Amino acid sequence: MARRPPPPKNTGLEVKIFGTKVLRRVAEPVAEINQTIRDLADQMIKCMYDEEGIGLAAPQVGVSVRLFVIDTRREREEDDPVPSPGELALETKMPLAVINPEITWKSPETCDFSEGCLSIPGVNGNVVRPSLIRLKGKNLDGDEFEWECGGLLARCAQHEIDHLDGILFTDRAEEGDMKKAAARLAKLKSEAELLEKARGG
Ligand SMILES: [Zn+2]
């Protein structure tokens, strides 16, 4: 997810833009947490910070595997809701790489939030999602965890797991917001398709 429009890129990884085929592919599970995966996660964390994002999924850098990185830590105000157990447990470990993530439960309660995405620069849209989820996954040491997550962590994790299934927030956003973004989306898509064609993709 994006915090604000990305500044110029300065990492080895390239964020794939809306219209690039890999963003619509269902990603493969990570079979083994080896050095390649650890290096990829490290690079993705650097890329996420460079782009001022709070989450980045592997397909967004062209690697179709089930891995995302996340850092949703923020200053809490006094009147903020009580953080969920997952926020308390996982924020201390951020930036965090989550391997083969699963949502094992979703609350019937929902909330809405204006989302953005590093792969869809300049576009925001209101998305309704469950307020709480149980997030299961492994860290880079292979330790499995499962926590009830709320707040920005739940929001971002759902957005990133969608990426692993080839789903973008624009598929779920309010129609009015997407109508406003239609011209921008069409432009991004045609540019990405041209680039991919030029590279023989
Ligand atoms: Zn995204």
Image (cartoon, rainbow, N blue to C red):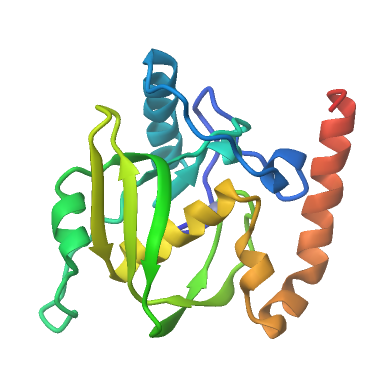
Picture coordinates of residue 148 (x, y %)?
25, 64
Total residue callouts: 0
Q: Quadrant of ligand 1?
A: bottom right
Q: Which percent across, then down, holds residue 186?
A: 84, 60
83 left or right of 101?
Answer: left
**Residue depicted at x 18% and y 43%:** 93
- Residue lying farthest to the top in this orientation: 35
Left/right placement of residue 48 relative to residue 181 reads left
On the image, the x and y values in percent for residue 89 come to 14, 53
Q: Is residue 1 visible?
A: no
143 horizontally vs 97: left or right: left
Is residue 93 something one can see in this rendering?
yes
Q: Residue at x 19, y 52 (%)?
A: 91
**Quadrant of the frame with the C terminus:** top right
The quadrant where residue 132 appears: bottom left
Q: Is residue 166 above or below residue 179?
A: above
| Quarter residue 61 falls in | top right
Which residue shows up at 18% across the image and 79% down it? 80
Q: Quadrant of residue 83?
A: bottom left
Give the answer, above or below, for where 193 lies relative to 105.
above
Pinpoint residue 37: horizontal percent, then vertical percent: 42, 22
Residue drawn where x is 79% and y is 42% of the image:
192
Rendered view: 182 above or below 96: below
Question: Residue lying farthest left?
Answer: 78
**Observer-nearest of 170 and 186:** 170
> In the figure, 32 relative to 132: above or below?
above
